[in-house]
Image (cartoon, coloured by chain):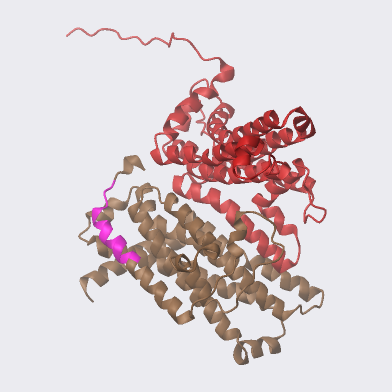
Chain colours: A red, B brown
Amino acid sequence: MAVYKRTYRGYNGPLTHPAWRFLVLQRYAFKAVFKSRFLLVGYVGCFFAPLLAICLLYLNQNSSVLALVGQKPGFLKIDAGWFMNFLTAQSVLAGIVTAFVGPGLVAPDLANGALPIYLSRPFSRVEYILGKGMVLGSLIGSITLLPVLLMFVIQSSLAGYDWFNKNLYLGNAIILSSLLVMSVFILLGLAMSAFVRWRIVAGALVLAVFAAGKGFGAVINNVMRTSDGYYLDLQYLLTTAATDLFGRTAEDAPIAPWSAWLAILTFCGLLLLLINRKLRVCEVAG
Amino acid sequence: MSLWNRQILAIMRIDLAKTFFARRGLWIYLLALAPAVPMFLHGLFDHKADLQGDFGQDVQIFAGIFQFFFLRIAIFFGCVGIFMNLFRGEMVDKSLHYYLLGPVRREVLVIGKFLSGLVAAVSIFCGAVVVQWACMFWHQSGELMRSYMFSGPGGSHLMSYVVAAALGCLGYGSVFLAAGVLFRNPLVPAAVILVWEGANGILPALLKKISVIYWLKSICPISIPAPKNAGNGIFNLLIFDIDPAPANVAMVNLILLAGFVVVWAAMRARRIEIGYGTE
């Protein structure tokens, strides 16, 4: 029987530009995320409240419709409080989405030893984290940043240039607060996923970080008769930072906005260290 | 001893070692004992400053921590970790088929695993209550503590907290065991239960009773009013006050609830199929 020499050739097809290679990972991870019908329905459900709010914004300025129900234009007060409360509600939904999506991004790769296969390609660890993080980032951004920013734009277009000019700082606050929430949730989701490697427990841990932090912070505050426990309460820290951006900081706030920012940065730093420690491929010495 | 009892004991022996000594479960000990640290430090600072502190205030603080943190967060998430691990953990470790291939009825397997989880959870969380109690009041004078514990309501209060913790493990444990048996991703029911239990204070009277926390709060000896300045956020739903039921009714109801859920889970366990590849 003739034995033919087999030769293997390198890939000749088009290569993705190195700067955008992380998007390949994001594309495939997205497909995996939306395989779950439950997640898809939940994700679509996150847009129900923004749609309703946009309708309210429209009605709020529509004098002919309001006249039918005996109201005058501007019956809703659209100010920093409106946007901040809405962003808070959307952030809660984003937290739940993180708990469900985040653990499925890294944990299976670690549990099944797939990380070396990724990193044996022209693909760095940073790109891997960026690619996986972008999945969460785009989901969270589409739930928090986009709807609230869209509401701001629609309100500006309805209320006129004067309103827009006077409330421009709200646009900045929406963008910065959403980016802050996105960064914390991305890092938390990836870190818990890498730390536990079991999807269900990692998801529970994402929720537990908020609930246990809140509870333990309250324990410290009550027992030690202090307000330092708020530094363990991630939800409170995020709210304090956002309140500062929206210019609604109370005089008697238990912790200063700058210290809340510092605590959030420290928390993010710790999560980054955890991700860096867990996402390592063993090197075999020659 | 009958065959079923021996099989239950054998399953418990295997699972207790896994639950108590697994590295995966270390966080449960931390969660249970975390409040003891600030409680001990509070006593230390008061002791160093030569202050006895306000004893009545300490009793209120302990009650608040028990109801707000321990029942609603520590025991809830602890039971998620312990009881969901009983079946889903075996799936992840690809070891459930060893149990299913053995000549053991599925119902016996479920009850054996539930009892092992319950023993572990009750030991950890009831032990943590006693440790927290000791850490909260260690700096008080011996005379005051003796009169509070043996002549006053202290002994019965401590017993009520221990019973509430044990029944919390029983109630949440049964629910999460059933979730582990029924759902491939038990995080979904856990999140739903978390929201339901959290919003218990603002539910109508009838719906309040379809929960574990309502009955647990009824067993607690001291009622904690909602603070006047609690800030904002959905977590503040946790501190809403409720109208309690009589303690003995609450205990019976929790035991009945747990019994019903475990029997239902045992019956559904007959249909468990292993799909390691899809986990």
Residue nearest the observer in this picture, B99 or A186: A186
- Number of callouts in the render? 0
**In magenta stretch: residue B269:** yes
Query: Residue A11, position in %: x, y?
Result: 43, 11
Using residue A79 as the reference point, say whether residue B31 is left or right of it: left
Which quadrant: the N terminus of chain A?
top left
Q: Main secondary structure of the magenta part?
A: helix
Stretch of the chain drawn in magenta: B261-274
**Where B250 falls versus A269 (above or below)?**
below
Query: Residue A231, position in %: x, y?
Result: 71, 53
In this view, which residue lies farthest toward the bottom?
B151
Q: Residue at x 26, y 70 (%)?
A: B6
**Where A110 falls versus B94 (above or below)?**
above
Residue nearest the observer in this picture, A276 or B199: B199
Quarter of the image holding residue B119? Answer: bottom left
Query: Residue B267, position in %: x, y?
Result: 26, 61
